Each structure stands twice: as C-alpha cells, then as structure tokens.
Image: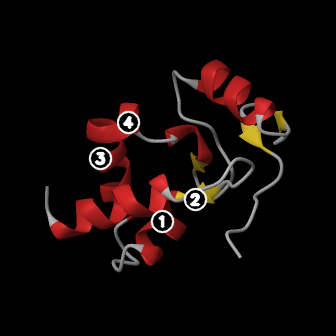
Amino acid sequence: MTSFADRVVEVVADTRPGDVLSYGEVAVEAGRPSAARAVGAVLHHHGDALPWWRIVTAAGRLVPGLEEEQERRLHAEGVPCRAGHALRRGSRA
C-alpha cells in the first residue's frame, strides 16, 4: 500500500459508530484534499476490513449497489437514511 492508502485506512478505521464522513473529508484527513476518488479506490480494495459504510459522497449518497446493506449498518448505528442518502453526518470531534 502507498502511504496515502495507509492513511486512508487509518482514517476510516478510526471512525466511530454514528460517524459519517464523505470521501472528500477522508481525503483531507489523509493529507490529499483533492483525492476523494482515490479514497473510493482504497475502500474498494480494503473495505472488507474497514467500516466502509460510514463513508458517503459529499451529498450523503450511499454506495451504489450496496445501498441496502449500507443503510442497514448505518441505521444500526443510529444514522437515519432516506432515498439512498444518509441524513445525518456525524463529526469526529
């Protein structure tokens, strides 16, 4: 893994139940603010070992094709969803 990928893994692994971050927010925390798409690629390759369901688009959209599973997991953590979008974006503060 590249150092960026390592940092993405760390950021996502450090999310807590109820946190919802955008791909862009993960990219910023990992040190490459313009690399939101690269965050998606890292999650695609390493997501099974990470709480991938806590990461959504900037508009809150859930992962296409995995909406039902992501919504189920977010709901279990207290995050409401509607029409394929997370309605609340938690903070990591």
Could you say whether the residue bearing mark 2 is in a helix, strand or loop? strand
Residue labelled with disc 2: 22
Colour scheme shown: secondary structure
What whole-number distance in Å separates the C-alpha atoms at marks 1 and 4? 16 Å
Q: Position of residue 83 (x, y in %)?
A: 79, 30
What whole-number distance in Å separates the C-alpha atoms at marks 2 and 3? 14 Å
Q: Is disc 2 in contact with disc 1, using a CB cutoff of under 8 Å?
A: yes
Q: Nearer the viewer, residue 35 or 31?
A: 31
Disc 1 residue type (three-letter) = Val
Give the mark, 1 or 3, whose residue is nearer the N terminus: 1
Q: Which mark is residue 41?
A: 3
Crowd class of label 3 (few under 14; some 14 to 19; many from 20; radius 10 Å): few
Could you say whether the residue bearing mark 4 is in a helix, strand or loop? helix
Q: Is residue 43 above or below residue 3?
A: above
Corner quadrant of residue 77: top right
Crowd class of label 2 (few under 14; some 14 to 19; many from 20; radius 10 Å): some
Q: Residue at x 80, y 31 (%)?
A: 75
In the rendered structure, the answer to whether residue 93 lies left or right of residue 4 reads right
Q: Which mark is residue 26?
A: 1
Disc 2 residue type (three-letter) = Ser
What whole-number distance in Å separates the C-alpha atoms at marks 4 and 2? 18 Å
Corner quadrant of residue 53: top right
Q: How many marks?
A: 4
Q: Is residue 46 above or below residue 19?
A: above
Can you tell which of label 1 and label 4 is closer to the viewer? 4
Residue labelled with disc 4: 49
Q: Position of residue 88 (x, y in %)?
A: 82, 53
Q: Residue at x 83, y 33 (%)?
A: 82
Disc 3 residue type (three-letter) = Ala
Crowd class of label 4 (few under 14; some 14 to 19; many from 20; radius 10 Å): few
Q: Which mark is residue 69?
A: none
Q: Quadrant of the N terminus?
A: bottom left
